[in-house]
Image: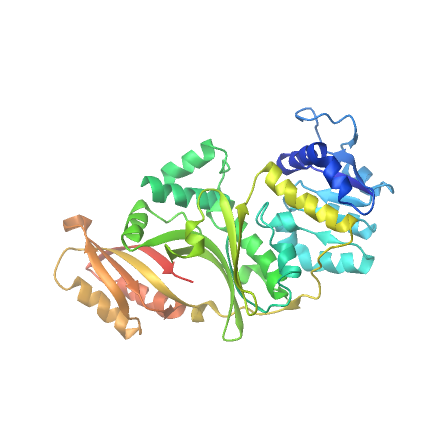
Amino acid sequence: MNMGLIGTGTVGSGVIFIDQKNGDKLSASAKTPFKLHTLCDLDFSGSAYDLSTYSLTSNWRELVDNPDIDIVVELIGGDEPARTIIETALSKGKHVVTANKLVIAKYGKELFALAKAKGVHLLFEAAVGGAVPIIKPLRSTLLPNHIKGIYGIVNGTTNFILTAMQNQGSGYAEVLKEAQKLGYAEADPTSDVGGFDSLYKLKVLAMVAFGVEVDISDILIEGITDITSKDIEYCKDMGLVIKLLAIGQEREGQLELRVHPVMLAKDHPLAAVNGVYNAIYVIGDAAQDIMFYGRGAGSIPTASSVWADVLDIVNDTTYSVDDLRPVKLRSLDTVMSEYYFRFQVKDKTGVLADIASILARHGISVKNAVQKGLGDDAELVMITHTVSESAKNEALSEINSLSSVSKISGVIRVGI
């Protein structure tokens, strides 16, 4: 079997590195002889590797049309032409391996159906979690389970920022600049810090773990841009850690999918996942609690997952995702959570009573409350018991109109 690689950038270069470093091991583990045959990119001049043993082309159609190519690896990322490349390769009866979470999230259902119709495989282990194996385990080892919940730290950039804020006491803007300097954040970090990267990965995980197709616009998404050093400080005081989580769980027979910051107890396994690392915590009805942990990005770690998919195709040990059923997600208004509230208030008698009265009218009870600072710097910090999204929104709208409340400075969910 021959393999064609489209895209020799960050992850693609890692694929070449592993081929040249561990090629003998790859060949020894393959039931059918195979090789990396053709590379496709617009410019090979910046490659750090000797490419003389490969066929080279700048035209992806030339690679896909080549009858000698059996497996197409797409690693250019983005929407187009990646989607067209994958669709064309499948239509021509070629297996496809991709790390493209955007394409799988947006067009996966149609592409899986096409692969099934053509009798070929579309594999995407590297699309979620980099080197962390999660897609195949969900479709093999954990297949006997009914998955009750899946909770992931699936974006290394945001995890690095939150970890640095926690450890250094620095503000969001300062740490973001540090992340950009170190290459952990893009010049435009919106996809990461806005939660969109985690959103696409959650959609992919929902397909695999729950077997569902959902409208991506129905998934709740909140990023980390509003998290401040004060939130981190108060969080520490309460023995909690803030993480951006991708959450999929079944409650009362309905599926919830959401991406947002969460305050976790320090003894929760996900609370100890720091820096650019990723982790995915799965709860099954048989296996119960399992966590997958490792490097969530990077050239060679992600390429490791790409090669795992290639070997599964070569050895006919693949996973499959098809027959996705459409479902409507649980209404966001009914989603239940505990909450952390931080109010900037006027330092005068009766503020706490006014706020507590409004919360009580909306059925929200308070676990604990403490005033921080004095005078113009006075803040009221609260943790509530479990409350619905709609009740929370109604209460905060009413609190925001109080003359004694200058600003609602922080709203973060607590626990999972």
Question: With respect to residue 363, does 322 lie above or below?
Answer: above
Residue 62 percent coordinates (x, y): 82, 38
Question: With respect to residue 378, does 324 lie above or below?
Answer: below
Display coloring = rainbow
Question: With respect to residue 365, does 278 lie above or below?
Answer: above
Q: Is residue 396 among the parts visible in the rendering?
A: yes
Residue 416 percent coordinates (x, y): 43, 63
Q: How many labels, in total? A: 0
| Foreground of the two, 242 or 331 | 242
Residue 74 percent coordinates (x, y): 70, 43
Query: Residue drawn 74% across and 47% down?
Result: 311
Query: Residue drawn 61% across and 37% down?
Result: 300
Q: Is residue 170 among the parts visible in the rendering?
A: no
Query: Residue drawn 36% across and 49% down?
Result: 227
Task: State the residue lying farthest toward the left.
Answer: 349
Q: Is residue 37 left or right of residue 152?
A: right
| Foreground of the two, 379 or 296 | 296
Say which quarter of the image contains residue 380: bottom left
Quadrant including the N terminus = top right
| Foreground of the two, 401 or 243 | 243
Residue 358 percent coordinates (x, y): 25, 70
